Image (cartoon, helix red, strand yellow):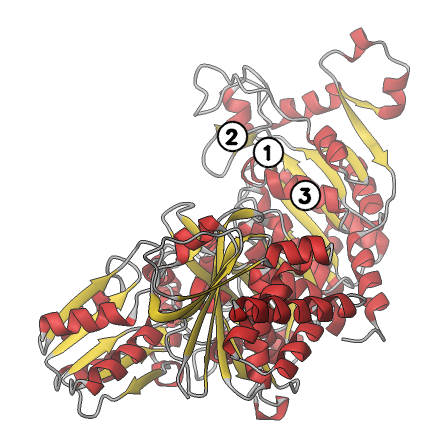
Amino acid sequence: MPSQLVDKYFRAEDLPQIWCPGCGHGIITRAITVAIEQLGLEPDKVCVVSGIGCSSRAPGYLDFNTLHTTHGRALAFATGIKLANPDLKVIVIMGDGDSTAIGGNHFIHACRRNIDLTTIIFNNNIYGMTGGQYSPLTPKFDKGTTAPYGNIDRPFDICDLASGAGATYVGRGTSYHANVVTSLVKKGIMNDGFSLIEAISGCPTYYGRKNKKGGPVDMMQWQKDNAVTVTAAAKMTPEQLEGKFLIGELKNKPEPEYTKEYQKIIDNLKGSDI
Amino acid sequence: MSNKVRLMQGNEACVEGAIAAGMKFYAGYPITPSTEIAEISAERLPRIGGKFIQMEDEIAGIAAAIGASLTGAKTMTATSGPGFSLKQENIGYACIAEIPVVVVNVQRGGPSTGQPTSPAQGDMMQAKWGTHGDHPVIALCPSSVRETFDLTIRAFNLAEKYRMPVLLMMDEVIGHMREKIEIPNASEIEIVDRKRPSCPAEDYLPFKPEANLVPLMADFGAGYRYHVTGLVHDETGFPSNSTDIADKLIRRLVDKVELNKEDIITWEEENTEDADIIIFAYGCVARAAKTAIKILREKGIKVGLFRPITVWPFPEERLIELSKSVKTIIAPEMNLGQMVLEVERLCNKHTKIERLNKVNGEIIYPEEIVAKIEEVL
Amino acid sequence: MEKHEVRLSGSGGQGLLLAGIILAEAAILDGKNAVQTQSYGPEARGGASKSEVLISEDVIDFPKVRVCDVLLSLTQKSYEQYNHGLKEDGILILDSSVTVDASVKNRIFSMPIIETAAKVLGKPMVTNIVALGAIVEVTKLVSDASLEAAVLSRVPKGTEELNKRALSLGYEIARQSMNK
């Protein structure tokens, strides 16, 4: 029933979206709205915040309280929203360059604070909006317009980065595994703390074309062929896992949430002399 | 000592003014000489049910303050030179997205790390031109502790009224000095709140201006779901590539301030009625000017003071008028000539303009102004 | 009443910023106007620091010392750095450790401020309060009652008696110095 979903959660008058044919972002955006639908969240209390880039156009199409901020800064804006009004469910959408390059500092600190934000990183391994420059998620030796001879940077593993920085819920899905994304986003929203979901998306226009990855279908096929669920991976040898990536829930370790800890300070001060 | 009359630091008066104005949220990053504003906010806000957060950097400080403002809270961030540079992009964001926020800059010597514990007035033009693109600017400049209290309230009121960032341009002397002040009663303080919509949610156009060019602002979470972006946008808030919409939007943003200048601009004059010479000074330097005027008047030299309190928009009309009746305007500044550029642009047809500049990290002394005036007499 | 311009100098960590604040608050308790400013280097401890207090019954425009009526120097370094602008008839209050050139014509009151706090009271942290007692005894800039009230409103709970003793020892060493 996609049309009902669009009717209910999208600003239909602002569609069609600007993404290229074959881009994975639309699928992931839809997967997020399915999670919201399944959780029965009140749209007036949902806030979707983004930075700058292809992914960050998503909130504009969604019928919630939506904020399209500056490049890399979505988590800092979102932190202000959540702390000022903890009743709001705040979902943050960022791209790979947006979140881990220019926004890297905000990213690790939002993880560290364990503030209740559900962050979905649309990882298409490239800066798409500006025309195909390499990002901190471009695999080593792949090409971008600013890496014409191959990228010599080592890429981040977004999920490891988030786990190490203190995110309490971490998972990975792909635009092929949209149902996994929905399930992870649901659990991420239910986690009272900072949740990070990496959603691998295909960019046939720039990343795919630059690196001879084929068209949209080939890129989806690649996601299907190389994703291994956490359960399956447990039974595989390191040789079998070579070149594969894990999908599913990678960390679920609740800890005290930031805005609730702050509220305790306020409550403790009540009645004390000014 | 009564609670109302007390010795207070400028930075503390800023926080007290902010709280009197209704501040409920502060986000920032420590930087000398503004840090006390963060420290006192951290101590005071949770006691009144407000929130304080120390962010990971200056950019995040203003970003969080803007985000919080969207939920309906009155918010502030404070910084000094290097941090003011870092906040510029998001100051522009708050301009185009029309989000109220108060940004305090306790100025210190620059460029770069410069002289962290010394006063300066080197960011006056950055306040006007620091963020890119054409945009509205309101910047206020206090020259005493009490005025810091009052102007912080005014900064919040203007931010709320015109839905935009308002800059409070302090300096290290005003921020760190302590002086006797009497805090007014709450009933004597005028408080302005942003105008919120009351129409049905489906009729709400978040960027459709009212008669004063300012649109009504709904709180996130209040039932008016709308889109906010730093891109040029139409009245619904959705991005637009229309040249017509872009032109109208940018002109309206600037006109919000330009067409309401009378409401926004304030200044102080002292001994200007019979003055042959006017000292143009603001911030801590205006205090040196006042002492200089006393010294010179005792010597029979007719000197007056023109002190812009609103530095941006600049009080053009009155200064032009005054310049027609004086022989010279002296502009002492703790920079190598910033606000004097406005004075020169506006008044050099009518009178002679002399600069007096100091950038060694020390306040300009009254004797230096006296000497300059005696030299040019 | 004329304006009094006071400069307190020493090394970072000696509590002179607080001493300046207390002196200004005492002046306000006396019904006068007061402004306090400071200048300091990057060091939280050590270095040379100064705290300035202007006291007047009129409005105080320029907030910094122009001609210094009273200079306190607790260290040689701070004396060298901050003795400029001292009036010809200005008062110089020095810790015994500070030496001045024989050519200095000011009224000089030299007394063991640091030693009194450290050895007699056993609490170097009250050096600033001993100094305040000494300054006020010599200059009578503020009333003793206002000074004590201002001190007590600023010091940590539980240290009131210690600080009162510091004040009275400050008065005492100043009297001894004045009688020399």
Residue B178's x, y, as percent? 52, 72
Q: Residues within 10 Å of mark 1 (few under 14, many from 20)?
A: some
Q: Residues within 10 Å of mark 3 (few under 14, many from 20)?
A: some
Residue B8's x, y, as percent? 56, 75
Name above or below for residue B337 compared with residue B313.
Answer: above
Residue B49's x, y, as percent? 75, 71
**Dot 1 and dot 2 residues touching (CB under 8 Å):** yes
**Dot 1 and dot 3 residues touching (CB under 8 Å):** no
Residue B97's x, y, as percent? 50, 63
In the picture, the quarter occupied by the C terminus of chain B is bottom left
| Secondary structure at numbered mark 3 | helix
Name above or below for residue C3 compared with residue A255.
Answer: below
Label 2 is found on which chain of the structure?
A: A
| Secondary structure at numbered mark 1 | loop
Q: Is residue B197 left or right of residue A133?
A: right
Figure disc tally: 3
Distance from the alpha carbon under mark 1 to that under mark 2: 8 Å
Q: Residue furthest front?
A: C180
Q: Is residue A167 left or right of residue B172?
A: right
* Residue for badge 2: A205
Disc 1 or 3, which lies upstream in sequence?
Answer: 1
The residue positioned 60% from the left and 38% from the top of the image is A104
Q: Between label 2 and label 3, give the one nearer the viewer.
A: 3
Residue B152, numbered circle: none
Distance from the alpha carbon under mark 2 to that under mark 3: 33 Å
In the picture, the quarter occupied by the N terminus of chain B is bottom right
Residue A103 is drawn in which quadrant? top right
Q: Between label 1 and label 2, give the one nearer the viewer.
A: 2
Residue type at mark 1: give it. Gly
* Residue for badge 3: A109
* Residue for badge 1: A22
Please say whether residue B156 is visible from this viewpoint: yes
